[in-house]
């Protein structure tokens, strides 16, 4: 499973600068007594070409962090940069265009439009932004995720694992600056989950893709190059070159 | 279970309201119809009974008598009856009022009435006094106003012989609810003058007042004994009741006509309700499954949906009744503004209206929700645990295709048979019944047709609106059943509108062509009301005018013809270049002395065909036996139903005056010069009316346009309801696709693009509905016109039809505004988290 050819161009997008940077990020829901501080000042940098997992107990703010980083939600305070663009202060239209051009998404479920075939779903982001799909890249991505014979199928005719693989292919096809994955294996059995995770890792290793993944599964997190831990809206720990065991141990310490 | 349902309804007030609106409008229209006609009816009967208070006994012409008048000599006989305090005869006839331009006013001669004196007088003098002397007259207030007469003026009125008489206008009166007087305009005289002016020998009625203490019924008996048979004697009370009843029959026609539109609206509302409940049930699959999981039986689930529909029906019916009250009052206000005399007081909801409205509203809602409720019971408890909403995969079942095929074949067959049989009333009904059956076929076939039709309707948007456009077209056919029901509701209104517009434009074209072919004249001079004649000198004068090319005079009289000796209109026309009636069999070229041409209807009644002999009783020549040489269409030709050569006519009946004159303008003469010439010739004859063919056509066009406008307006309600259906379906679909929309937004679809996606979906739905409607409307409009009369020139009002399609699409877009706004405003993060 090697991907050659355009890899150079892909990587050339600037290895030096970080893909995503957040400074003093805060997020408060509600007001007064009912206020919930989901993020209490997070400083974090995601290096280009790295696979980072965000972990933390339920309610730690990991999903909120991802939504803020991806421009899906507004922040209360602090700054977020995707590449050289600062997200905070952008209007809905500019945020939408930014997502369109620079960000890929993989969600836990309901990743695909039921009316479109697998191929149409994969090409959707490109079509929305009015770009032509690079046929060579398309073929390779499809080959990589092993969907060649499933392209004409509708999502309802695909298994959960296949659906997530389509979602991965869709995220890869537009060559985004960063892919945000929200519990991408949460709904899958362990075998399908492992497949999807190795595709993600392969795309980082061989295409230089930057991926930020939120998960609560130590095994999934261990596929990443680096794991950051959140608790009560604060960054509390991080591991480089994690293993399932080291992730689990860190989590246990956090919960204690 | 009851609590759960009610809590659910309370939680979704807005949804409830939107759903209710469809039924509210339908019930409102029906209730409004009743309010309108009830008010008119009560108003009339109140006026009638008020009038009856003044009269104790009335003597009316007998039903069987040939001459509808009460003999004058009865007046004196009644005066001698014991217990009679006063008795007066009512004279009514016609007496043309001459306007300030020297011509008789209006298209018909003014009615002339006698104004009674004392207690028996039912006429309300609004200004001035009642006529007391032979040289005094009163005028109805409306005619006085439009013709510019005021109390104190001198007015000229023609008597039955056409002689002019001058009167001093001493007062104005209100015609009240007398439609006949209101329509023709009326001039009132003393009883003697009225009799003299109208030439009436008898009375329209004789009114009798009883002496103090004599009961009306007793008096009726003694009057009845005095006058003998041949006339009808009634008490005043009974007379008022009969008048009210006769009037009630008139309002009944109005009621039925309006109710027809009300039922169309209710049918459309039922489709909307059915669809809404279907979607609601589909969306609440998990809720239903959860209820089943915790122990609710199928029956309870069914009951909860039915209960919900009953509550919706109840609420919307109540709102509908209130709407109806407003609509009825509004309609009355509008009608009275147009100058028609209608009662506007005492607008109220009769108990019958409330009952009909409530029952209809609730029953239609509940029945429409029955199938969705049954679907709800099929939800398996395990569905509560499934997270992904299942996509509705629709397959055209064999049963559906078979039934649709049967209905379509039956509908087409019946219609084709009716069309091939030819024009006739029963054929028209047959064709329309075929249309209804075909519509049912289309209704069944709907889901199958959505896919190909959305390809057609979506062809342009798909190419024009990029990704949102393509997604929208896909969405429009994603749930074929839902789309079909949504669009069929619109189809009903559009089909009927198209049908009416095809009918009117075809009638316009057909009439226009017939006018050109059979009425190749530019001007027609006829007597006001088309009854009577004018001297031959008028035609002679016209013949001398250099502006005119040819002048044809028509003469006619009534004479007995045929073996049975029934009366027919026998007449002739003076020949002139360019005027040649068209024969359906035989030829007008053979119309030589001793022959006759007969109209198709008359020929049927007489049982004659070309070559037969027709006996005609003449006044000067005894009975003559004429040979039939031509038959012609009475509807198309302008000549009398039994037409003889003009030389023969004079010999048979003497030198009668002309009844009508046709004149053609010489080529190159300006329209206004020709008109001036004809009018100058007609000026000495006050009752000679000049009608131009362009005016005639204009009047016909106006009447058609008016009809088209009223019917389209009434059908607009059904269209409005179906638009509510589109809005409802869309907003429910938007709700269903919350996560999908969020996904698209996350992938980079902007808010305007998302809004556009939903608008295009609505546009496609609207256009699908309109396409089917237009197709049905055109086909059955054609079927209707070809079963109505012969020689139809089918005319497709392409502009109007295109406008219907465009407006339907536009209306769909309008219906999508709110749902689209809501979808675009939703937060992506919240929507992604949603169920």
Image: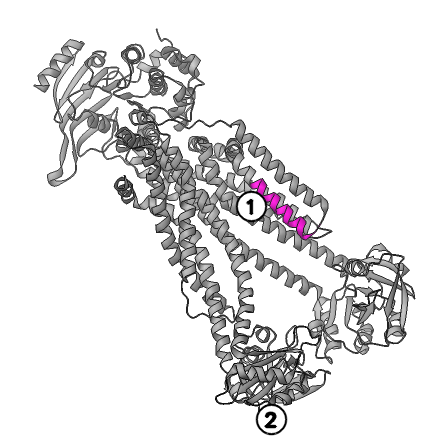
Check the picture and name the quadrant holding the C terminus of chain B.
top left
Residue A57: mark in rendering: none
Residue B402 is inside the magenta segment: no
Quick one: label 1 or label 2, which is nearer the N terminus? Answer: 2
Q: Nearer the viewer, residue B269 or B730?
A: B269
Host chain of mark 2? B
Question: Could you tell me residue B10's position as x and y percent?
Answer: 27, 45
Host chain of mark 1? B
Q: How crowded is the residue under tag 1: few (<14 C-alpha within 10 Å), some, or many (20+)?
A: many
The majority secondary structure of the magenta stretch comes to: helix
Q: CA distance from mark 1 to mark 2?
A: 62 Å
Magenta residue span: B423-439
Residue B133: mark in rendering: 2
Q: Is residue B506 above or below residue B473?
A: below
Q: Quadrant of residue B82?
A: bottom right
Question: Could you tell me residue B161's position as x and y percent?
Answer: 73, 83
Whether residue B503 is visible to the viewer of this picture, yes or no, is yes
Query: At numbered mark 1, what does the secondary structure look like: helix, strand or loop?
Result: helix
Q: Nearer the viewer, residue B134 or B589?
A: B134
Question: Could you tell me residue B87's position as x and y percent?
Answer: 58, 88
Which residue is the site of mark 1? B495
Q: Quadrant of residue B200?
A: bottom right
Residue B438 is inside the magenta segment: yes
Position of residue A179 in the picture relative to residue B147 (left or right): left
Question: Could you tell me residue B710's position as x and y percent?
Answer: 54, 58
Position of residue A32 in the picture relative to residue B323 (left or right): left
């Amino acid at each position: 499973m090697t991907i050659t050819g355009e890899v150079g161009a892909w990587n050339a997008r600037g290895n030096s600068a970080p893909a995503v940077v957040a400074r003093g990020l805060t997020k408060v829901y509600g007001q007064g007594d009912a206020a919930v501080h989901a993020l209490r000042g997070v400083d974090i940098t995601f290096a280009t070409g790295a696979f980072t997992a965000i972990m933390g107990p339920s309610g730690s703010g990991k999903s909120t962090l991802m939504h803020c980083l991806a421009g899906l939600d507004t922040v209360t305070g602090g700054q977020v940069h995707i590449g050289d663009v600062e997200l905070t202060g952008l209007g809905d239209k500019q945020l939408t265009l930014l997502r369109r051009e620079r960000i890929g998404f993989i969600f836990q479920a309901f990743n695909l439009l039921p009316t479109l075939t697998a191929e149409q779903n994969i090409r959707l982001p490109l079509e929305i932004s009015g770009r032509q799909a690079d046929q060579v890249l398309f073929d390779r991505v499809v080959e990589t995720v092993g969907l060649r014979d499933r392209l004409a199928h509708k999502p309802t005719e695909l298994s959960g694992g296949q659906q997530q693989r389509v979602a991965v292919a869709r995220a890869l096809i537009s060559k985004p600056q960063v892919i945000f994955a929200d519990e991408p294996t949460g709904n899958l059995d362990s075998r399908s989950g492992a497949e999807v995770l190795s595709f993600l890792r392969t795309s980082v290793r061989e295409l230089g893709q930057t991926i930020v993944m939120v998960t609560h599964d130590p095994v999934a997190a261990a596929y990443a190059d680096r794991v950051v831990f959140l608790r009560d809206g604060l960054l509390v720990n991080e591991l480089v070159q994690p293993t399932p065991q080291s992730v689990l141990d860190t989590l246990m310490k956090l919960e204690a | 279970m009851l609590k759960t349902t009610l809590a659910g309804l309370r939680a979704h007030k807005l949804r409830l309201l939107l759903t209710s609106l469809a039924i509210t409008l339908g019930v409102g229209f029906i209730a409004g119809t009743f309010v309108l006609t009830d008010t008119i009816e009560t108003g009339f009967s109140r006026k009638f009974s008020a009038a009856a208070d003044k009269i104790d006994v009335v003597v009316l012409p007998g039903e069987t008598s040939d001459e509808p008048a009460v003999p004058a000599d009865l007046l004196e006989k009644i005066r001698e009856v014991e217990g009679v305090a006063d008795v007066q005869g009512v004279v009514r006839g016609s007496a043309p009022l001459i306007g300030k331009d020297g011509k008789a006013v209006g298209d018909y001669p003014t009615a002339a009435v006698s104004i009674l004196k004392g207690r028996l007088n039912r006429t309300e003098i609004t200004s001035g006094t009642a006529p007391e002397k032979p040289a005094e007259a009163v005028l109805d207030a409306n005619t006085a106003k439009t013709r510019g007469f005021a109390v104190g003026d001198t007015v000229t009125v023609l008597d039955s012989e056409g002689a002019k008489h001058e009167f001093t206008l001493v007062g104005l009166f209100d015609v009240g609810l007398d439609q006949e007087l209101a329509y023709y305009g009326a001039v009132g005289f003393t009883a003697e003058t009225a009799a003299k002016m109208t030439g009436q020998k008898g009375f329209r009625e004789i009114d009798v007042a009883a002496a103090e203490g004599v009961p009306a019924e007793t008096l009726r008996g003694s009057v009845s004994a005095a006058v003998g048979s041949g006339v009808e004697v009634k008490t005043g009370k009974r007379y008022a009741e009969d008048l009210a009843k006769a009037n009630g029959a008139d309002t009944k026609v109005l009621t039925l006509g309006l109710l027809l539109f009300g039922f169309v609206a209710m049918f459309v509302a039922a489709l909307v309700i059915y669809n809404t409940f279907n979607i609601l049930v589909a969306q609440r699959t998990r809720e239903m499954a959860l209820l089943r999981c915790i122990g609710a039986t199928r029956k309870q689930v069914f009951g909860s949906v039915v209960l919900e529909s009953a509550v919706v029906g109840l609420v919307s019916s109540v709102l509908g009744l209130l709407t109806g009250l407003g609509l009825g009052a509004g309609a009355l206000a509008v009608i009275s503004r147009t100058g028609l005399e209608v009662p506007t007081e005492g607008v109220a909801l009769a108990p019958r209206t409330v009952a009909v409205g409530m029952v209809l509203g609730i029953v239609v809602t509940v029945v429409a929700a029955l199938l969705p409720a049954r679907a709800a019971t099929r939800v398996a408890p395990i569905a509560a645990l499934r997270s992904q909403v299942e996509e509705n995969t629709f397959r055209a079942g064999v049963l559906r295709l078979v039934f649709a095929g049967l209905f379509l074949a039956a509908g087409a067959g019946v219609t084709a048979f009716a069309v091939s049989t030819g024009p006739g009333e029963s054929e028209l009904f047959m064709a329309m019944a075929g249309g209804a059956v075909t519509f049912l076929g289309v209704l069944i076939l709907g889901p199958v047709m959505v896919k190909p039709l959305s390809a057609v309707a979506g062809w342009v948007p798909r190419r024009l609106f990029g990704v949102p456009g393509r997604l929208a077209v896909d969405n429009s056919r994603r749930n074929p059943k839902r789309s079909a029901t949504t669009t069929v509701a619109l189809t009903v209104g559009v089909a009927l509108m198209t049908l009416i517009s095809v009918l009117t434009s075809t009638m316009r074209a057909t009439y226009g062509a017939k006018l050109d072919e059979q009425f190749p004249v530019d001007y027609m001079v006829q007597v006001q009301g088309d009854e009577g004649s004018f001297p031959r000198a008028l035609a002679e004068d016209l013949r001398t005018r250099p502006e005119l090319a040819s002048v044809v005079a028509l003469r006619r009289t009534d004479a007995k013809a045929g073996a049975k000796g029934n009366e027919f209109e026998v007449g002739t026309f003076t020949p002139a270049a360019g005027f040649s009636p068209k024969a359906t069999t035989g030829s007008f070229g053979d119309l030589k002395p001793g022959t006759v041409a007969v109209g198709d209807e008359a020929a049927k009644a007489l049982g004659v065909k070309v070559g037969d002999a027709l006996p005609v009783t003449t006044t000067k020549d005894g009975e003559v036996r004429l040979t039939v040489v031509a038959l012609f269409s009475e509807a198309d030709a302008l000549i009398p139903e039994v037409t003889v050569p003009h030389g023969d006519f004079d010999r048979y009946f003497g030198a009668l005056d002309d009844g009508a004159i046709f004149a053609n303008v010489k080529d190159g003469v300006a329209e206004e010069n020709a008109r001036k010439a004809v009018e100058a010739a007609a000026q000495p004859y006050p009752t000679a009316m000049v009608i131009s063919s362009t005016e005639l056509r204009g009047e016909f066009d106006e009447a058609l346009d008016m009809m088209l406008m009223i019917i389209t307006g009434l059908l607009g309600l059904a269209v409005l309801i179906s638009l509510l259906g589109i809005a409802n379906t869309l907003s429910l679909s938007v709700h269903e696709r919350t996560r999908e929309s969020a996904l698209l937004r996350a992938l980079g679809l902007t808010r305007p693009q998302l809004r556009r996606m939903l608008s295009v979906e609505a546009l496609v739905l609207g256009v699908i509905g309109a396409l089917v409607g237009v197709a049905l409307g055109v086909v059955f409009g054609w079927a209707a016109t070809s079963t109505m009369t012969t020689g139809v020139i089918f005319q497709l009002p392409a502009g109007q039809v295109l406008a219907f399609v465009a407006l339907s699409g536009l209306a769909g877009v309008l219906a999508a505004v709110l749902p689209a706004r809501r979808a675009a405003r939703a937060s992506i993060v919240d929507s992604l988290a949603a169920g």
